[in-house]
Amino acid sequence: MTDREAKDRSDPAIMGRRLVAVSIDEASIGRSSADIEHERAVAIYDLIEENSFCPVGVETGPFTLHISLADGKLVLDVKHEDGRQVVTHILSLTPFRRIVKDYFMICDSYYDAIRTATPAQIETIDMARRGLHNEGSETLRERLKDKLDFDFDTARRLFTLISVLHWKG
């Protein structure tokens, strides 16, 4: 842990605007490839380690987040660390369908390329993958702008988790 991370974790204002736990409804995702499972595990780890997240109008945290699908919709269930309910947001997945479909096609190409392609080819595919990931992250931020306050890096990690749910859903 860096000095900055230690300071941030000791600052009540910063700790109050963060996620300390993230879970995904296992029934919503089923089995995935090893590459997708790895992406999901890394995204959860990174998200918990470094994030900025707070429901709009809520002053204190920290928070937990449970992500699931219900009736083909994305469910984001936010609670206080002690389990008290804060808010549940339900979003249509329709705005994410094209982005996620394209993202997974590029991811498949990327995982194939890292095994056989040249570094220049891998870099080109990775740039396209990051571009779609950024687009999905911005779409998520836009859809939740009046509900949840989170930074771009948090949005990127959340988009990774949502894309796994969307793909399996």
Image (tube, rainbow, N blue to C red):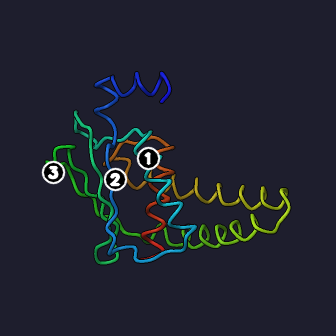
Q: Label 1 to label 2, Cα distance in Å?
A: 8 Å
Local SS, label 1: helix
Q: Residue furthest left?
A: 84
Task: Please give left or right for residue 153 compared with residue 28 in the image.
Answer: right
Tell me the kind of residue under disc 2. Answer: Val
Percent from the top left, x then y, of residue 3?
A: 48, 21
The residue located at (43%, 53%) in the rendering is: 44
In front: 109, or 114? 114
Residue 39 lies, with reference to residue 15, above or below; the image says: below
Tell me the kind of residue under disc 1. Answer: Leu
| Tag of residue 47 | 1
Tell me the kind of residue under disc 3. Answer: Gln
Residue at image mark 2: 22
The residue located at (50%, 43%) in the rendering is: 152
Percent from the top left, x then y, of residue 128?
A: 70, 60
| Tag of residue 85 | 3
Foreground mark, 2 or 3, reads 2
In front: 90, or 53? 53
Q: Quadrant of the C terminus?
A: bottom left
* Category of crowding for the residue at label 2, using alpha-carbon neighbours closer than 10 angstroms: few (below 14), some (14–19), many (at least 20): some
Local SS, label 3: strand
Foreground mark, 3 or 1, reads 1
The residue located at (22%, 34%) in the rendering is: 60
Q: Quadrant of residue 14?
A: top left
Tell me which numbered mark, 2 or 3, is placed earlier along the sequence: 2
Residue 157 lies, with reference to residue 29, above or below; the image says: above
